[in-house]
Amino acid sequence: MKSLKEELLNLKRQDLYRHLNTMNAAQASRTMVNGKECILMSSNNYLGLTEHPELKAAAKDAVDLWGTGSGGSRLITGNFRLHEELEETIACFKGTEAAIIFNTGYMANMGAITALTGRDDIIFSDELNHASIIDGCRLSQAKTMIYPHKNTGVLEELLQQNLGYRRMLIITDGVFSMDGDLAPLPRLVELAEKYNAWLMVDDAHATGVMGHRGAGTAEHFGLEGRIPVQIGTLSKAIGSSGGFVAGSYDLIDYLRNKARSFIYSTALPPSVIAVALAAFRVLQLNPQIRENLHLNAQYLRSGLKEMGFTILTEESPVIPVLIGDANKAMQMAQQLLSLGVFAPGIRPPTVSPGMSRLRVAVMATHTRDDLDKALAAFAQAGQILGVL
Ligand SMILES: Cc1ncc(COP(=O)(O)O)c(C=O)c1O
């Protein structure tokens, strides 16, 4: 039998061994990583809300009022009035009849997919969907057909060839997490409606980011009311923690009864819920925060392109800077960190071989000075490593 040590050694030989970086300060645009001050250039805290005074105050007040833990699952003793208020807020924000909170976005995907599909059903899943979707599909035991990234032509052929299942479910990320591109939602909606399939969109990276109110990709494409299962996370732009599903009363009622990751886990603590509630208030009252995010993304992208870096997509604040070779991508990340910029390398199995990259993400709270310093570091690191 192969020992764990051998397997770990193998990972090291292939440059695929993972280690943790340590944050020594808050998740802010300027922070400290592994004891070194740096500009944070890969956070999912897109709007910088984890440092917002209203969110911090909401957490402290909630601890004083409600205590620290929730003490039970939602269906037993852990359902505070705050949880219900947040679900009502999310439904209103997404323009759906109802919403349900899960403890993470990962659990929202796992819970929704396994509750909605089983052995008699079929799932059509984009090849670049997030791991939590892939795991949900596997656990559901539904037949799963993977279609090439955003290829709605192949998807339609697969739909035509696989009629007759009890339920058909098309699943896609809204904004793809490592590529930053958008799902072809208008066409996916047409196909789902034509073939009487459900459409499930994971807006983990679009919530608070895309659309004129930040409500996500449905709003961005003007498709409100036409995506029956909408997933989101509270852990990224919302600056808190947790995930959710938004949709019809029946869908949410069904998930409350059937989604095992909802039923069998202790509810999120009141302070986490209070922070998310504060974030939705801040989002609504301060649209300029989201506008800053997109302006910053545009500025950084243009600067990197002018230097000669290959930017894979240009549709969201996720800026994938292609390096190619896994080892080179990790060296580039290391070089950048030594120059005071934290932009981790992403390599297989998270992305395909030859597609290793730096996953750069801007924040609304980056200043021009932060972005100019980051660009200078990219230029220097790129030259040192012969990437440019
Ligand atoms: C597309 C996508 N879905 C779901 C998740 C999981 O969300 P969470 O971090 O809240 O578990 C992530 C990221 O972690 C993601 O990128």
Image: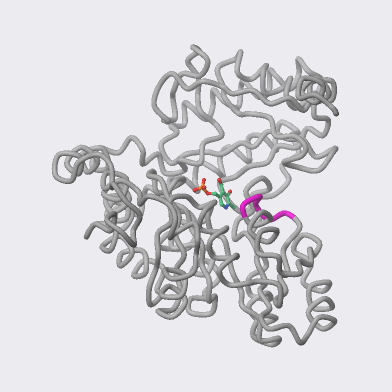
Q: Which colour scheme is used?
A: one colour
Question: In the image as oriented, which residue stretches furthest toward the front?
Answer: 1
Secondary structure mostly seen in magenta is: loop
- Could you tell whether 205 is left or right of 162 in the image? left
Give residue 380's position: percent from left, percent from top: 68, 18
Residue at the (64%, 37%) spot, across then down: 359
Q: Decide which of 120, 388 is in the foreground and name it.
A: 120
- The image quadrant that residue 64 belongs to is top left
Verify whether residue 170 appears in magenta: no
Residue at the (82%, 21%) spot, across then down: 6
- Could you tell whether 192 is left or right of 273 in the image? right
Q: Decide which of 135, 93 is in the foreground and name it.
A: 135
Say above or below: 169 vs 59.
Answer: below
Residue at the (62%, 40%) spot, across then down: 301
- Could you tell whether 105 is left or right of 319 in the image? left
Give residue 76's position: percent from left, percent from top: 31, 59
Residue at the (72%, 74%) spot, across then down: 122
Question: In the image as oriented, which residue stretches furthest toward the left?
Answer: 65
- The answer to whether residue 285 of the structure is visible from this angle is no
Magenta span:
128-132
Image quadrant where one finds the C terminus: top right
Say above or below: 321 vs 245.
Answer: above
Verify whether residue 130 appears in magenta: yes
- The image quadrant that residue 386 belongs to is top right
Image quadrant where one finds the N terminus: top right
Give residue 116's position: percent from left, percent from top: 58, 72
- The answer to whether residue 107 of the structure is visible from this angle is yes
Give residue 12's position: percent from left, percent from top: 79, 21
- Could you tell whether 175 is left or right of 73 in the image? right
Q: Decide which of 236, 268 is in the foreground and name it.
A: 268
Q: Decide which of 3, 105 is in the foreground and name it.
A: 3
